[in-house]
Amino acid sequence: MKVKDVSRIIEELAPLSLAEDFDNVGLLVGKAEAEVNGILITLDCLESVVDEAIKKKCNLILTFHPIIFSGLKKLTGKNYVERVVIKAIQHQINIYAIHTALDNVHKGVNHEICNRIGLKKQQILIPKHKQIKKLVIHVPKSHTSQLQEALFQAGAGTIGNYDECSFSIEGQGSFKGNSDSNPNLGEKGKREIVQEHQLNFTFEPHKQHQILQAMKKAHPYEEVAYEVSTLENTHPQRGMGMLGEFEKPMNELDFLNHLKTSFNLHVIRHSGLLDKPIKRVAVLGGSGAFAINDAINHKADAYVSSDFKYHDFYKSENQILMLDIGHYESEQYTKPLISAYLTKKIINFAPALENAKVLISEVNTNPVQYF
């Protein structure tokens, strides 16, 4: 198994196209063609994590936060970022970052937070726009089923939890092969009139290349006429943060204690208590001040996130209980989430591949300490 194989598996869960524009995700250090003898999963890639990878003979570090975030102009070892990159290169260790690509998927960071808290009826807090594309294509009736199946296998027609492929406009089309063409239908030089179906498929942007490749392979025409457009609809399972509900409401103090137990917290920074039951909860792992109004607009009773500044707490406007549980603390369960997913996928990929071990880093990379 190579680094590019692991990358492909990870990107099935969290396509890199879903990462925010400011982010830096994917393979940051190393070679896609390198053979993988072990994978170490961490939230942050520090020197101590690289040392751990060397000791445990893992040559691929899968980090949630990217170690390289802004441009590097020199590699002199003057700061922790440069020292990590230098050591990784010296020891032929590859580093891959996933970050907001995993934040923006339904089964990602925020889904894990909801599960740890015990929230049901989960949905995306801030759904992404322009994450649904539409393919329109005409095909002879005789090849409709063949093309439809090929495109379904390539990932077309599936958005969220539902499938969509529609037939509309049945009519006639024509084609004429010349001396250089090799049509699968009709004869060269003779214009053919055929009965056609128009097929409409929806799909996710990161699947476009494989879908178009499958279309061209399965379609009987040598030159295929098709149209791809981007829909304005929001994607039901792509976006930042999540909402969920308790089966039974709990009072605020019980909720605070429940959070402390669920996340092994020393302290919780929070806005003023409102003396009302907590049932509907919004969550967002990492820095979540930007989504305070979204949580309020969705009628959440509480909003769990981190990195709130002093004046952010005023935004609660006595409408919502805001809880800052800490950046690291909110994302701490991302490591076992990735590990469980990768382990299952790698076993299916190569059951006998003993050297593709998946380990969770034992290094606590939290830079914030409590007294």
Image (cartoon, rainbow, N blue to C red):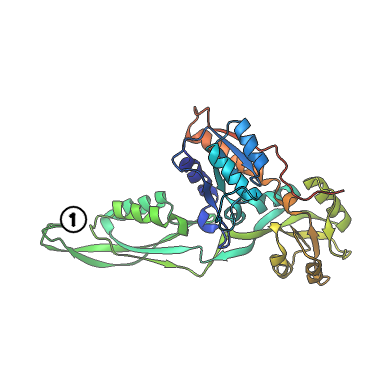
Q: Nearer the viewer, residue 328 or 104?
A: 328
Q: Is residue 109 left or right of residue 277?
A: left
SS category of the residue bearing label 1:
loop
Q: Nearer the viewer, residue 12 or 370?
A: 370
Quarter location, residue 303: bottom right
Q: Is residue 119 left or right of residue 232?
A: right
Write the residue at 65% across / 35% down.
Answer: 52
Write the residue at 86% across / 63% down.
Answer: 276
Q: What's under tag 1, amino acid-wise?
A: Pro
Q: Which residue is mark 1?
A: 183
Q: Nearer the viewer, residue 345 or 365?
A: 365
x and y percentages locating residue 286 in the rendered image: 69, 56
Quarter location, residue 297: bottom right
Please tell me how many numbered marks the rendered image carries: 1
User: How many residues crowd around disc 1 within 10 Å: few (fewer than 14), some, or many (20 or more)?
Assistant: some
Q: Is residue 325 left or right of residue 104?
A: right
x and y percentages locating residue 310 in the rendered image: 81, 66
Write the residue at 78% across / 50% down.
Answer: 368
x and y percentages locating residue 50 in the rendered image: 62, 39
Let me know if residue 63 appears in the view.
no
Q: Is residue 84 left or right of residue 33?
A: right
Let me know if residue 194 appears in the view.
yes
x and y percentages locating residue 351 in the rendered image: 50, 30
